[in-house]
Image (cartoon, grey):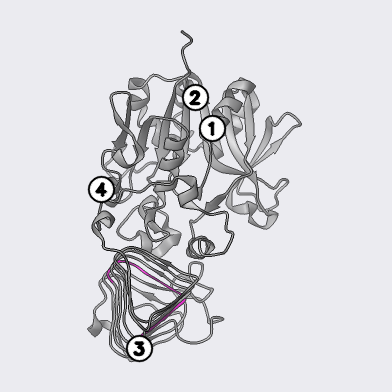
Amino acid sequence: MIRQPETLVLLLAGGVGSRLNLLVESRAKPAVPFGGLYRIIDFSLSNVMNSGLTRVGVLTQYKPLSLMRHMGLGEAWDLTGRSRGVKILPPRTGSKDSDWYRGTADAVRRNLDFLEANPADEVLILSGDHIYHMDFYAMLEYHRFKRADVTVAMMVVPRSEIHQFGAGIVDRDNRIIDWEEKPEQPRTNLASMGIYIFDRNYLLETLARDREEVDFGSHILPWAMAHDNVFAYPFYGFWRDVGTIQAYWEANMELLQPGTCLSPEKWGVRTNVEAEGRVADRAPARYGHGAVVRGSMISAGCTIKGMVVNSVLAPGVVVEEGAEVRDSILFADCVIESRAVVDLAILDKQVRVGTGAVVGSGGRDARPCKLYPTHLYTGITLVGKNGVIPVGQVVGRNCVIRAQTGADAYPGAVVPDGETV
């Protein structure tokens, strides 16, 4: 009997994701809700499951509790059993308690005991913070055919965006011959997706070589290209980096477009419906006589008596009579009271918008947020978890209302554009 090659998956889920602002104050970036029912990490875990891979180590670090609760023992993704499993690898500090992972390679290096305890032919290294649909088995076959030491998943992106990524220059055989990490003057439009396959022994030798090589893109790959066989795996499917508020909002809105390629149900994406919020226990959504819903995604447990247009509502959201929600993303159990308006906003869990209040007032070409001008500049307003917008309160564009903000925290009846409360 011919032995089938085995692959170990390492899923990097410890990034801070600070550009997502309030959404990552109490959770890791991969645990941020997406599309009403899902978390961002569901897409990577479902790709692993649908590719037939069965052994996964999840490297956590930054505020991991929400992520750990969501993943449980891996049952939602068929990752439990004698020959399969998902292992949560808690944060590993260095010589000092404050010594966080210094980069992607450093994170893997500090978990070498997991690698050594799980023999495999290859190690597939993933990021847990992208929205995408990918067959990892096809990439593994490519890696084996090329007899590669390292294979990097890469896709074409607009040159105007390449400065956000690692960029590879390849020859006719797709061998990577040069590398630019977040180039200001790019020579290529081929971007790294942050997905790598390493020959296991090669990875162990590489990580043991120089402990100052802490990042795959900046350190490991340039050295490997100069000495060994490094290939690009061309990817032509759906992949989105949702690391900014704008990109996150756009990806959610893409779910609502007719004929969209973003289709979690068709892709077989699973989530843990038994975790926090217990989606499995929610009743079907209910609609009042005066409800108007257009181009929106309404989750189980919602009660809609007002108007919802071009918006994504997570389980348990209540939109009362006369209220309006437009171009917005509402996390679980938000309440929009009568005659309130939510326009171009993202509301974290259990936000209450009081009667007649407005979130997102005025023209969408407002000035950027004063404190976070690179986070909020297109008119989107953020309201943190358990925030309260008082009765009649008006909140402008590009504003931040922090988590737990109560009705008595507002300095006046109007929060001007770009302000933070």
Instruction: Quote the CA–CA distance across marks 1 and 3.
Output: 56 Å
Q: Which label was assigned to residue 220?
A: 1
Q: Earlier in the sequence, mark 4 or mark 3?
A: 4
The residue at which mark 2 appears reads as 206
- Residue 135 in the image: state x and y as whole percent: 53, 36
Confirm whether residue 91 shows in the render. Answer: no
The residue at which mark 4 appears reads as 69
- Residue 307 in the image: state x and y as whole percent: 41, 80
Q: Which residues are magenta?
A: 339-350
Q: Earlier in the sequence, mark 2 or mark 4?
A: 4
Q: Dot 2 lies on which element? A: helix
Callout 3 environment at 10 Å: few (<14), some (14 to 19), or many (20+)? some
Q: Dot 4 lies on which element? A: helix
Q: Earlier in the sequence, mark 1 or mark 2?
A: 2
From the viewer's perspective, is 182 left or right of 416?
Answer: right
Q: Closer to the camera, 175 or 272?
A: 272
